[in-house]
Image: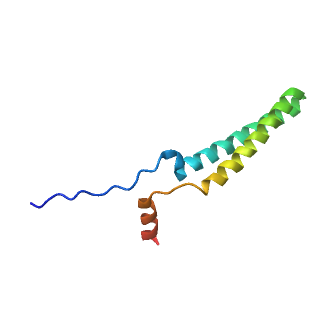
Amino acid sequence: MGRFRIKKKDAVIPFRQTLAYRLLLATVSVVLLMVTVYFIMRYVQQGYNVGIIASILAAIMAITAVFYNLSEVRNARVPARTLKRAKQRR
């Protein structure tokens, strides 16, 4: 029986820097945008001016969040093991 080999582990990437986290944030911000647009339509039908203004401001913030999160997806890190798997499939 030979000696056991110790496998070197890849560097652990914090979850907040991974592609999955960035895409999750982008998805949540798109859902938030859809909800705010729904509320805008409801308040326009009801003629509730304060709700319309508040919903428009929330929609602007949601649009900003969508663009910010989608731009941060480009900066996301992918583990080396995942990259190796992707190259093997080609």
Q: Is residue 48 visible?
A: no
Picture layout, residue 43 above or below residue 20: above
Q: In which quarter of the image is residue 45?
A: top right
Q: In which quarter of the image is residue 10?
A: bottom left
Which of the colour schemes (rainbow, by chain, secondary structure, one colour) is used? rainbow
- State which quarter of the image contains the N terminus: bottom left
Q: Quadrant of residue 30?
A: top right
Q: Is residue 24 visible?
A: yes
Residue 83 % position (x, y):
46, 63
The residue under the point 59% across, 50% down is: 23
Q: Is residue 67 left or right of residue 10?
A: right
Residue 29 % position (x, y):
67, 43
Residue 6 % position (x, y):
24, 56
The residue under the point 61% across, 54% down is: 73
Picture layout, residue 31 above or below residue 73: above
- The residue furthest bottom is 90
- The residue furthest left is 1
Q: In this view, does 56 lie to the left or right of 20?
A: right
The residue under the point 82% across, 33% down is: 42
Tag count: 0
Q: Nearer the viewer, residue 42 or 72?
A: 72
